[in-house]
Image: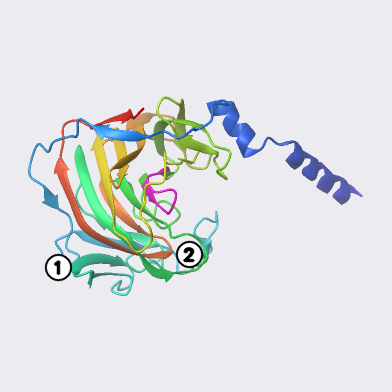
Amino acid sequence: MKTILLAATAVLAQASAPSPVDQARAIVGDAPATSQTLVLTDISQPTGPMRELFNRRDLTGWETWLGYPDPAVTYRDRPGATPIGRSRATTGDVAVKTIDGQPALWVKGQTWGAIVHDADLRDYHLRLEYRWGDQRWAPRADKAPNNGLLYHTHGAPGAVFGTWQPSVEFEMMPGSTGMAVAVGRDVRIRTTAALDPTLISPPIRYRMGGKPVEIVNGTLIWNVENARDAERPAGEWNTLDLYVLGDRAVHVVNGVPVMVVEGLATVAADGTRTPLTHGRIQLQSEGAETWFRRVAVEPIDRLPKVVEKR
């Protein structure tokens, strides 16, 4: 009887718990995330020479870190496994190959992890091109391809789920490219958002002029969806532009601004907040074959403006 009562109590508690939509509504209000057409103006001009991060010949400047042999355990509190890290050759995971007549960074995606560039970057405009390959791997074999450009990377390799370093993520996934994600429990990201009940969790989307929110891994708002889908159809190349100045950034997909973030920071165990203003970049491996090319950065001293076109 006691077991039955405990089970019934748990069911009732779950039934009475507010839904993700109700929880999000309490944070951002009822104003819906109606469509906005955002455009870039006053584009930042480089203040110095462009630097190619991919030399189009080999992986000079890049280092690979791999997570668990079975990616399905990645998000478990106790994965029961040890990350691969740098303990084996990775030529079958990452390589320079030719596609569409040009050299590109090839990421197989079967084992999760990242290739990390050694440059500590600040105040820059980064541009790269990517396209999805054909291969998908468990546990995401039947899901949309997923990857990410991670910036302001800091901390120890594998500190996040044994697989990535703490960072801010410029998400790459059909429908969500440009989404902002906090990678690591110490990372904080501020932006503005509005309610979008069509999303699963969290049901909020970036909106210029929306309610201020803070993205914190492990909470309801662990990401904020992009303003709109600007990715091209599968098989085509996409261009990502990332503008970063100190603790602020603008995510641009195929020329369309889809996310503005600020207040990038790390928070220590005692609550001390430190602005996050520089770091390395990671290109993820997360279950989908992906090609990257033309990866380059140039210094800037201001961000472009993002305005709503009416």
Quadrant location of the C terminus?
Answer: top left
Q: Residue at x 59, y 29 (%)?
A: 25
Q: Which residues are magenta?
A: 170-181
Horizontal and vertical percent position of residue 56 = 15, 64
- Report the Cα–Cα distance between label 1 and label 2: 30 Å
Left or right of residue 22, residue 101 in this image: left
Q: Residues within 10 Å of mark 2 (few under 14, many from 20)?
A: many
Is residue 30 visible in this depiction of the protein?
yes
**Which sits earlier in the primary sequence, circle 1 or circle 2?**
1
- Checking the image for residue 71, the label placed there is 2
Q: Position of residue 12 (x, y in %)?
A: 80, 40
Q: Which residue is mark 1?
A: 57
Q: Determine the residue located farthest toward the left in the rendered image.
A: 49
Q: Residue at x 57, y 42 (%)?
A: 198
Q: From what the image shows, is residue 307 above or below residue 75?
A: above
Query: Quarter of the image holding residue 61?
Result: bottom left
- Percent x, y of residue 220: 55, 38
- The residue type indicated by label 2 comes to Pro
Q: Is residue 244 left or right of residue 186?
A: left
Instruction: Check if residue 80 falls in the magenta segment.
Output: no
